[in-house]
Amino acid sequence: MEKDWVCVYSTEHNFQAEIAREILENEEIDCVILNEHDTAFPSIGEVEVWVHQDFKVKAIELLKDLIL
């Protein structure tokens, strides 16, 4: 990942990461989803949503209801 990008959301479920992506893109915040699930054991690992560091605070605020 680029050095100026930060992880703002992490989950075990792909659908939650996609919801986070949609929320961010609706606010015109570019984001990237990284699937860190193990290919041999898909139940192991996380799916992460990354944004440019300039949007970190706003992204976290937008996603606060997804973070349990």
Image: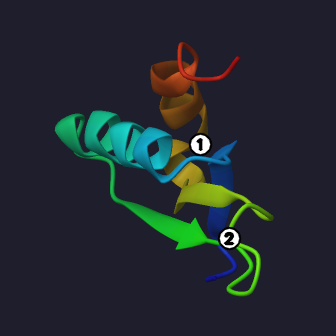
Residue 7 position by quadrant: bottom right
Question: Percent x, y for residue 17?
Answer: 47, 47
Query: Which quarter shows the C terminus?
Result: top right
Question: Which residue is drawn at the image coordinates 69% and 73% (left, top)?
Answer: 36
Q: Say what amino acid the circle numbered 2 marks.
A: Pro
Amino acid type for the residue under numbered disc 1: Lys
- Circle nearer the viewer, 1 or 2: 2
Q: Which residue does the numbered mark 1 point to in the structure image?
A: 56
Q: Nearer the viewer, residue 43 or 21?
A: 43
Q: Residue at x 45, y 23 (%)?
A: 62
- Image position of 46 with respect to 21: above or below: below
Task: Tell me the number on the disc at residue 34.
Answer: none
Return the x and y of residue 47 as percentages of the image width and height: 62, 59
Q: Which of 62 and 54 is in front in this view?
A: 62
Residue that mark 2 sits on: 42
> Disc 1 or 2, which lies upstream in sequence?
2
Q: Where is residue 61 in the image (x, y as percent from the top left)?
A: 54, 20
